Image (tube, helix red, strand yellow):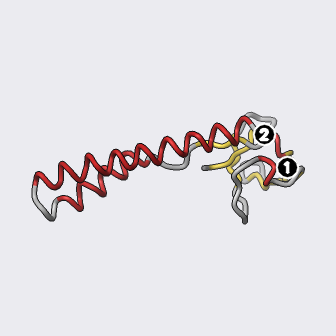
Amino acid sequence: MKFFVIDNNGDKIYVTFAYPVERKSDIPYEFTVFCETCNEEKYFYRQDVRAETGTDSVIGGALVGGALGLTVGPQGALLGAILGGLLGANTDAEEQRKLHRFNEG
């Protein structure tokens, strides 16, 4: 997941944390973020933080699976791409569940 806040100008500012974050309760109640656009520190509250997906695992899984399958031949590349895409889709579904849990909680 990628975390961000929206400032008063409507700009999206990405936030990184030095520790694992799965729920909003994992974030301090109040924190500061340095805005590189306006060159100043801004204060935000944990409820201001939103999350969005960080990857597209279906495409990555299909590409890796297809590349690995090439060592076996064209049928292996096709099978590898299909299996990789399915595994990637499962990862994307789990990411969506985590996003929903974070953004709603």
The front one of 46 and 6 is 46
- Residue at image point 56% right, 40% down: 96
Q: Estimate the spatial distance between the alpha carbons at disc 2 and disc 1, rounded to whole Å.
A: 8 Å
The residue tagged 1 is 42
- Give the SS element for disc 2: loop
Place of residue 73 in the rendered image (x, y in percent of width and height, measured from the top left): 10, 58
What element does badge 1 sit on?
A: strand
Is 60 placed above or below 8 here?
A: below
Q: Residue sitting at 12 percent across and 62 percent down? A: 72
Foreground of the two, 68 or 34: 68
In front of the other: 69 or 52:
69
Amino acid carrying label 1: it is Lys
From the image, tell me which residue sits under label 2.
7
Residue 70 image point, x, y percent: 16, 60
Residue 87, placed above or below residue 100: below
The residue positioned 77% from the left and 48% from the top of the image is: 38
Residue 79: give x, y in percent of width and height.
20, 50
Which residue lies at the image location 42% right of the left edge and 49% below the top edge? 57
